[in-house]
Amino acid sequence: MKITYPHMGNLYIVIRALLTSLGLDLVLPPPTSNRTVELGVRYAPEFACFPLKLNLGNFLEARELGADTILMAGGVGPCRFGYYAQVQREILRDLGVSMEMVVLEPPDTHWSELKDKIRWLVGDRSWWEIIKAIRFAWYKARAVDLVEARVLYLRPRVFEPFELESGYREALRKIDQAASKRELDSVVKGFFRFSNRLPRRSGSLLRVGLVGEIFTVLEPFANYDLERRLGLLGVEVTRSIFLSAWINEHLFGGLLRVKGTKHVKKLAAPYLNFFVGGHGRETVGSTVDFARQGYDGVVHVAPFTCMPEIVAHSVLPSVTKDYGIPTLTFYLDEQSGEAGIQTRLEAFVDLISARRERVRKEKH
Ligand code: SF4
């Protein structure tokens, strides 16, 4: 059995750690590229969500490299995510691509089913070995998130963002290869030491919160590298979703001390009082959270036609009205153009910078 799974940012590092610790054979798809999009768009229904198309492209590319089993997450709730894996399975079958698909449903809703599927995957490995593998994957998720958050903070501050970027790539490579928690700690410390040595600009920067659907927030290919674009425009970006927070909330029941989204769900009221699927409620709550913390603006990303984010988008003007925080929404898919995204970002940065100046003058 040669297992593959779709890309979502640096998730591949975490899943690779988990599965290889359990002795499974993996075939990672090549990094998502224009070819991945081309394949996904060619075979998926036109109206399918962008992540479905990219996942499908990942599977087809992994198949070319010899993968025969797909590991895919399932979902619950009012949006289309719950059907993703089934639709992808049918498409692959129609194409004559024979691949086994194992769908892992969310542990907080289908625990016994998840347990059976894990058992099927890992054979007679003990639960203790499984727990150890999960713990190691968790350490990797934390290491990746610490390094990513550091890059988001430093990118607009350093004189040499490209040097920071290459240090970041190197740190990710080492995290991926690390074989123990001690090694991981030393990679993270090494990266912090390296990044602290980079010469920095002084002065206060514009701060923008990034909210939206999890895949588009975490996958730079899907969001046209928004974080980097904003960083290079001199803006500090704070992400509302990190992988480790998601894992803590959904796998560990929020037991670990990692900042999650519980508080933002509460902040979404009274604008949005119930679950609308995906991360719609968190989008609204995080926008309120960023506004209360005095951020200059919020960038909201979602796949084109994403239902939970359309709901969230429809209430964001009320948040803007109440808190005065500007928001900019991007609906992204294979038709989005880089030039248009860059132009809108630049205009948004000009707008929030002018607003900050106006507020400053009003205060004095
Ligand atoms: S959250 Fe949005 S993009 Fe994701 S499956 Fe649901 S509708 Fe599609």
Image (spheres, helix red, strand yellow):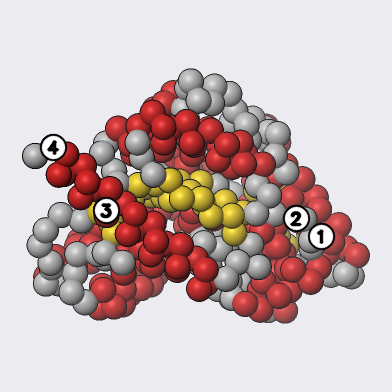
The reply to whether the residue tagged 2 has its Cβ within 8 angstroms of ligand 1 is: no
Circle 2 residue = 48
* SS type, badge 4: helix
Q: CA distance from mark 3 to mark 2?
A: 38 Å
Left or right: 288, with 235 as reference point: right
The residue at 62%/41% (across/down) is 310
- Residue type, mark 4 in image: Lys
Q: CA distance from mark 4 to mark 2?
A: 48 Å
Asked if 119 appears above or below 226 in the picture, the reply is: above
Q: Residues within 10 Å of mark 1 (few under 14, many from 20)?
A: few
Asked if 27 appears above or below 269 in the picture, the reply is: below
- Residue type, mark 3 in image: Ala
Q: Nearer the viewer, mark 4 or mark 2?
A: 4
Q: Residues within 10 Å of mark 4 (few under 14, many from 20)?
A: few
Number of callouts in the render?
Answer: 4
Q: Nearer the viewer, mark 3 or mark 2?
A: 3
Residues at discs 4 and 2 in contact (Cβ within 8 Å): no
Tell me which label, 3 or 2, sits earlier in the chain: 2
Label ID, residue 359: none
Asked if one can make out residue 65 in the rendered structure from this viewpoint, the answer is yes
Q: CA distance from mark 4 to mark 1?
A: 53 Å
Circle 3 residue = 354
**Residue 223 location (% of width, % of height):** 51, 62
Circle 1 residue = 45
Q: CA distance from mark 2 to mark 1?
A: 5 Å
Circle 4 residue = 363
* Quadrant the N terminus occupies: bottom right
The residue at 77%/45% (across/down) is 83
* SS type, badge 2: loop
- Residue type, mark 1 in image: Pro
Residues at discs 2 and 1 in contact (Cβ within 8 Å): yes
